Image: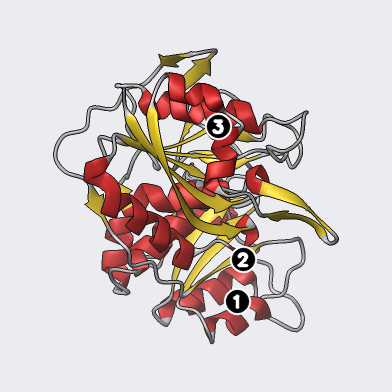
Amino acid sequence: MKNILLITTGGTIASTATDNGLAPGISSTSLMEFVPEIQEFCDFQTMDLMNLDSTNVGPTQWRKIVASVEENYMDFDGFVITHGTDTLSYTAAALSYMIQNSAKPVILTGSQKSIYLRDTDARRNLIDAFLYASDPDSSGVKIVFNSKVIRGTRARKIRTQSYNAFDSIDYPDVARVMGDHVTHYIVDQIQGSPIFSYSMDHPLFVLKLTPGISSNVVKILGEVYKFLIIEGFGTGGLPNLEKDDSISISKAVAEFTSEGGLVVMTTQVPHEGSKLSTYEVGSSLTKNPGIIEGGNMTLEAIVCKMLWVLGRTDNREKVKELFLKPVDYDRL
């Protein structure tokens, strides 16, 4: 049987009730006592890495997760990481860049309700995660949730309470877990050794456009940040009408990039991505060497890839080169 390491980080799946609401508090050993059937198809060990609400999980915690996988990589056949759902898709995207080319599965899962409750998705998700991690055709960073297996670079939380909380955005599920059986739709062929990295720098800001937003926002952000991710409308573009008291957003961004800044343009629309060349408000941006188009990457993947890239270089041309190179089907 495969030998799987469970790494717990907290989240709803391991939460108990407190006077101030749910808070993580269940150990990895206690968590596994709720799913004794897992020992029927794999061996496992557990590790209590942290016990956090996922709202508090970011680059520092990602590095700890990666270190726990790398340090135990040769001793286990796969890894299951339990995690809160609120930032699960960010962590999955981050690990997809920080743990590349892994022939062994690194599986993230969680739940919408605590494993302590009678009516919960926690047990099923945990069993499914171990089933997928134990399957010989599984590899790489994936999310297993509600019986779906989703690439770490393509996942997004789309519901706050329902059990079908996650979708694969503009990319098919790679597998389904049905009862005690895994049906693979896509099997990756991994050759060579895994590549682990830890540098995740954060000199960037995500700006969500709203109708009528002042261009002063870009100027203020430019005093602090060299790198911006801008969520535009529809297929993409920037407001280019000048107001009585300020320049347009489009002109403010042009000034930002002329001073060495870099902008990734994406869309607020969940599916089908950006295409700046569609409309006049966007086509002029394609000629700006300081603007990169996010295409159909998820926001989570854009943010985490930029953090990963900026951990290697802040040279604008090198940043563009690394960002545009596909990793684990993040760009299609």
The single residue placed furthest to the right in the displayed view is 19
| 219 versus 159 height, above or below | below
Q: Of the residues shown, which amino acid type is indicated by label 2?
A: Leu
Q: Of the residues shown, which amino acid type is indicated by label 1?
A: Val
Q: Residue at x 45, y 25 (%)?
A: 39
Picture coordinates of residue 303, whole percent (x, y): 49, 58
Q: Residue at x 65, y 51 (%)?
A: 233
User: How far apart are the two marked residues, 1 and 3, measured between alpha carbons?
Assistant: 44 Å
Picture coordinates of residue 104, whole percent (x, y): 29, 35
On the image, numbered disc 1 is attached to which residue?
218
Q: Which mark is residue 126?
A: 3
Q: Nearer the viewer, residue 65 or 204?
A: 65
Q: Of the residues shown, which amino acid type is indicated by label 3?
A: Leu
Q: Residues within 10 Å of mark 1 (few under 14, many from 20)?
A: many
CB atoms at circles 1 and 3 under 8 Å apart? Answer: no
Disc 3, SS: helix
| Mark with earlier residue (3, 2) | 3
Foreground mark, 2 or 1, reads 2
Foreground mark, 3 or 2, reads 3
CB atoms at circles 2 and 1 under 8 Å apart? Answer: yes
| 232 versus 247 height, above or below | above
- Residue 273 appears left or right of 133: right
Q: Which mark is residue 207?
A: 2
